[in-house]
Amino acid sequence: MSSRTSRWRVTGSKQEDRFYDKTVRYPGRNFHTVGARLLPKISDTLSAEIEAALQIGRTDGQPGMKDRDILAWMGYAGLTYANKETRGKPKATAAVLYLSGDRDSYYKTTDGSTDSGWNPVFNRTTWFSEICSGMYDQYRWSNLIYPHVAVSVEPVSKHKVNLQFGPMFADEKDNGATDAYRGFYAQARYDFPLLSQVFGKRGGLSGAVVGEMFRYGDYYAHEAGGEDTATWLRVELNGTF
């Protein structure tokens, strides 16, 4: 039997003291991020993940935009079942992701209220979704509550199928939104091998097919006759050597 262990990880503080784009100067931001992560192993097949982080600091003031305090936070909690000894190597995770939102617009606040929107700082990527990253300017993920389920299985050796789905909500109804329900998100991914030892003993070719679907909720304004469902598909060819 494997031993049961828990791991802690503490992130150091970060600082972002300038904020510009190509044509407009926005207020400088002087803030720090600190967090902790716990990975308890409950049993041979059951584990958990708990992560939390806090951002504190202050933005600079400028004409038409007051300086304001920064107080934002994020959290993640998940419970995972995984059994590599069972045929198909099933794995299932139930989790909730939380990113705090701003009560006012991130760019146009004029009343000096606290900036409470989570800022991913330098880690601005598509993260877990291509479609949903489009919700955020410059991949600045924030203002999100995402309870979801992720399931994976390996029916044949090295052929992996992953599914993830769940509703999304806004932490704050910002920018004039009248409802917090962002919509329902689902993703399916199939990874498979193609050729082995093409570039040496450890090299090879593999492929993947990834599909996403997002059905928009009432957080977004709907145009009459407009689309209310977004779909996305990608086919990958990957080589290792």
Image (cartoon, helix red, strand yellow):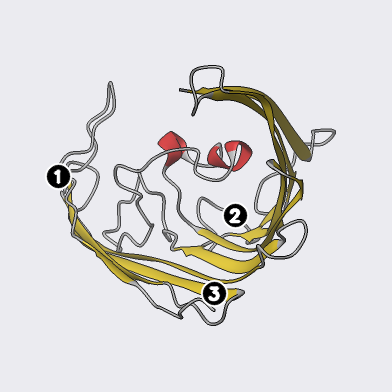
> Residue 83, percent across and down?
67, 67
Considering only order in the chain, which callout, 3 or 2, is on the residue closer to the N terminus?
3
Considering only order in the chain, which callout, 1 or 2, is on the residue closer to the N terminus?
1
> Residue 229, percent across and down?
78, 39
Q: Return the residue at label 3.
A: 47
> Residue 81, percent across and down?
65, 71
Q: Residue at x 43, y 63 (%)?
A: 100
Q: Quadrant of residue 193?
A: top right
Considering only order in the chain, which callout, 1 or 3, is on the residue closer to the N terminus?
1
Quote the CA–CA distance across marks 2 and 1: 30 Å
* Circle 1 SS class: loop
Residue furthest out toward the top: 198
* Circle 2 SS class: loop
The residue under label 3 is which amino acid type? Ser
Q: Residue at x 57, y 68 (%)?
A: 96
Q: Return the residue at label 1.
A: 17
The residue under label 1 is which amino acid type? Asp
From the viewer's perspective, tell me whether residue 165 is left or right of residue 118: right
Q: Which one is in front, 54 or 191?
A: 191
Q: Which one is in front, 197 or 215?
A: 197
Q: Which one is in front, 72 or 179?
A: 72
Image position of 114 with respect to 152: above or below = below
Quote the CA–CA distance across marks 2 and 3: 38 Å
Q: Residues within 10 Å of mark 1 (few under 14, many from 20)?
A: few
Cβ–Cβ under 8 Å for marks 2 and 1: no
The residue under label 2 is which amino acid type? Ala
Residue 177's disc number: 2
Q: Which one is in front, 118 or 196?
A: 196
